[in-house]
Image (spheres, rainbow, N blue to C red):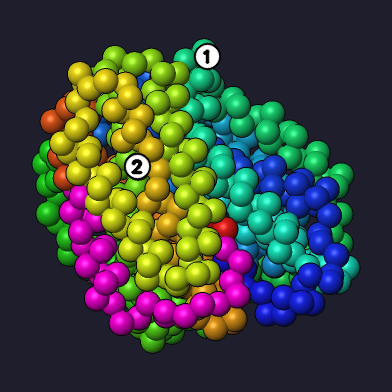
Amino acid sequence: MSATVADTGLAQKSPSVPFRVSGSVATGSILQPLNSSMIAVAIVGIAAQFGSSSGITWVISGLYIATAVTAPMAGKLGALLGARKVYLGGLALVALGSIAGLLAPSVGWLIFSRILVGIGTATQYPNAMTMIRGYAERHGAQPRTAITTLAICSQAVVALGPTLGGLLVGAFGWQSIMWINLPIVAFSAVAVTKFAKVGFVGGISVSGRKLLHALDVAGVVLFLGLVSSTMLFLLSLTTDPVWWLIPVWVLVLALFVQWERRADEPFIDVRALARNRALSATLARTLLTYTAFYCVFFGIPQWLQYSRGMSATEAGLTMLPVAVVGIGSTLFASRTYRRYGVRRTLTVGTCALLVGGLLLASVESSTAPIVVLLLVAAVLGIPNGFNNIGNQNLISSVTSVEEVGTAIGMYRTVQYIGANLSAVVLQTTAGHVIGDDGLHRTGWFIAVAGVLLLIGVLMSRNMGDRRSTNVSTA
């Protein structure tokens, strides 16, 4: 996230939100990146148990669709019902979904359990942020350090997820990515209840009718229909295209835009998107960036297991350079942005993505030496840090204080949609079993995405090339 420091001097003089508060609310915020990243090394074992079918793709996509729809609602729901109450309710849903996944008798049941987990994990980050800001305002503290703690936890876990998941799956089977949630949920619930005593943050007396109005339930339903129809159509292209979904998608899109334009409290502010071309362009760039990133994130671990014959543990460890370089590039990208601005930051990120795609398309093979695999993985760790920092700071620089929260919410939703689209791209380019040829086609897709992004960055007139006082973390 990006936090704008309006008065740096004042922030430095104010005390920080204590770690007992920020650390306790950060414990639950790791659940979303953990569950979205460990699946990369578990999907092969899941396919082996339940059979390789299009339903396996929805084990990944189901969680992201649920998170994409729920995330923008979570903060508003916390403001209406109480941030800590919604946070703890989300933990309960994660526990319920994890238990359901452990007992799953079929892939359909597993998809349902992942949807529950996705809904639950979507509540953590926004309500953790609300509790931190509530504490800061109540006690006259500055929230910058606490927000950084939240963001670093999220970035570290999503980067280390394949490695941790590989160790767990290798030792205990794919079910371990479900039961690992339970001790984290229990620890987080105790920590938040005991240490996150932030006072009464959010929560007002509101009727059920007013609650539904405030949450824009109709907009949420239409958005869900829009995302789901898109996914169903794209997935059908790999087998038997369902062409009748195109007019359905167009109709749902028209209804969604019309409804959101008239809604008092829209789920997605389409008017703001229409007015702010720089914001719209950044969200479009983010969608393509994360689609390419998750192709790497999901595709390489599966290829390592299918084509190289690696175990889940070995595949996870091979992905470790992506994590290490990714965290380091995030820190370096922050310095690059402060010194050179967003255009150069994004140029470095998109060039690295282009190079990484070309390496996947031309160098990676089932017979390549392990050192080559590690070097390619290291290169692929660079783009996420630079693109994440650049795009988030650009969103902050082209929106007002009143708009930036909604804009960052849309940024995270687009990120989750990109993860969904990557599953479709992998299905199209590589199929159920990713071999050398499939990986090479995926690499070419990533390279083309890098070229398009680079052209967009270099030619854009809406880069907001100015230095700011933003303190950025991924």
Give the spatial CA distance, label 2 vs label 1. 31 Å
Residue 375 is situated, as x and y percent measured from the top left of the image, at 34, 33
Residue at the spot of label 1: 172
Q: Is residue 446 magenta?
A: yes
Q: Tell me: 31 left or right of 256.
A: right
Residue at 40% over, 59% down: 387
In the image, 463 versus 93, the foreground residue is: 463
Quadrant housing residue 207:
bottom right
Residue 259 is situated, as x and y percent measured from the top left of the image, at 40, 78
Vertical relation: 430 (above or below) 205: above
Magenta part of the protein: which range? 445-472
In the image, 59 versus 375, the foreground residue is: 375
Give the label, 2 or 1, closer to the camera: 2
Residue at 51% over, 20% down: 167
In the image, 434 versus 215, the foreground residue is: 434
* Residue count near mark 2 (Cα–Cα under 10 Å), binned few <14, some 14–19, many ≥20: some
Q: Is residue 231 visible?
A: no
Q: Label 2: state its secondary structure.
A: helix
* Residue count near mark 1 (Cα–Cα under 10 Å), binned few <14, some 14–19, many ≥20: few
Q: Is residue 385 magenta?
A: no
Residue at the spot of label 2: 379
Q: Tell me: 344 left or right of 121.
A: left
Residue at 51% over, 46% down: 328
In the image, 461 versus 65, the foreground residue is: 461
